[in-house]
Amino acid sequence: MQPLLKTLATLLLGGVGAFAATRLGLPAPLIIGPAILVTIAGLIGLPAQIPSLLRDCVFVILGCVMGAGVTPQVLQAAYAWPLSLVLLVLCVAAIMAVTARLLQKMFGQDRLTAVLSSAPGHLSFVMGLGADSGGNMAAISIIQSIRLLSLTLIVPIFVTAFGHALPQVAASASTVLAPVILLVLLTIAAAAGIGLRRVGMPAAYLMGGLLISSAAHISGLVEGTIPAWLSVPAYVAMGSLIGSRFAGVSLHDLGQYALAGLISTFATVAIAALGAWIASQATGLPLGQVLIAFAPGGVETMSALALLMHADPTYVAAHHVLRLFVLTALIPLFLGRRARRS
């Protein structure tokens, strides 16, 4: 099947999944529904693909949606962030130490594969290290994909069940941006994303959209929200992107490493939830918001969930970007001299 047809088929499946999840009343249905349905399609051999250009465009759009919700009141709450960020760093280190040990002891993985499989994020960095160092790439990719999918499904349920009511994070205005202003905003945000990517910023396109949109709204240069006809497809594409990670994975490999992925994910969720509870108690921030910030899923995915779950997107994005920088230092530290030689 041609790449364009694969992409259209994936997005169509994602749209059906979003509609079904909405009708069923699932939390964050625009992401959860597509993630589930596209994952199933990939596992049974149906085409599932989101090209990199479309992915980057989606990240820019979602970054701009996040920025539209940044207000001076939101920024005033940042005084509680430093303690929360320190606790996040400790939580990330604990996740790697515990899950790597589990994978070695319970499943007999070598240290390299176990450490890279346990890393809570920074997937491109992890896969690059694995390829260069001779890790078990099938195990690493499947365990990491199970973590990402599981957290996408679990976090909204956790927030709904245990996170208590989150305060509504309203956009800077109730009006919708005019088409010309929207086009200019997206263009500048995309240019910022390209620049941030060149200097090595994690989640560069999402951060470009967030920074430009936040600055434009706080300064008063722009007033209004991103229209639903653009934001809703972006959420659906995000969910479809998560599900597409399982395209091409054989059922044999999935069965071989699924249990390791599920157990390591359970340990990861338990440690992240404990860290989030401690941070919430220490800072007074809403538990649901802190859960989303501490959940080690993809930066873009968790930031999109923050929007759908009415959490403060700037708080969530700051924590997830810090997690990636921390992992850049922690992963080679856990691997020792072998990683430094690579």
Image (cartoon, rainbow, N blue to C red):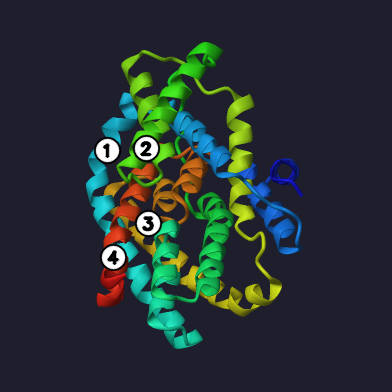
Q: Residue at x 44, y 25 (%)?
A: 68
Residue 128 coordinates in the image, percent (x, y): 42, 63
Q: Are marks 1 and 2 in contact (CB under 8 Å)?
A: yes
Q: Nearer the viewer, mark 1 or mark 2?
A: 2
Q: Residue at x 70, y 59 (%)?
A: 42
Residue 300 visible here = yes
The residue type indicated by label 2 comes to Thr
Where is mark 1, residue-wise? 78
Residue 48 coordinates in the image, percent (x, y): 69, 52
Q: Nearer the viewer, mark 1 or mark 4?
A: 4
Cα distance in 3D space between marks 3 and 4: 20 Å
Q: Are marks 3 and 4 in contact (CB under 8 Å)?
A: no
Whichever of callouts 1 and 2 sits on the residue coming sooner in the sequence is: 1
Where is mark 3, residue-wise? 276
Q: In this picture, is 304 found above or below 256?
A: above
Crowding near the residue tagged with mark 1, few <14, some 14–19, many ≥20 C-alpha atoms within 10 Å? few
Q: Secondary structure at mark 2?
A: helix
Q: Secondary structure at mark 1?
A: helix
The residue type indicated by label 3 comes to Ala
Where is mark 2, residue-wise? 314
For residue 72, side relative to residue 62 (left or right) = left
Q: Quadrant of residue 88?
A: bottom left
In this orientation, which residue lies closer to the viewer: 164 or 120?
120
Crowding near the residue tagged with mark 3, few <14, some 14–19, many ≥20 C-alpha atoms within 10 Å? many
Cα distance in 3D space between marks 3 and 1: 16 Å
Residue 24 coordinates in the image, percent (x, y): 73, 46
Q: Nearer the viewer, mark 3 or mark 4?
A: 4
Whichever of callouts 1 and 4 sits on the residue coming sooner in the sequence is: 1
Where is mark 4, residue-wise? 330
Residue 97 coordinates in the image, percent (x, y): 34, 74
Q: Which mark is residue 283?
A: none
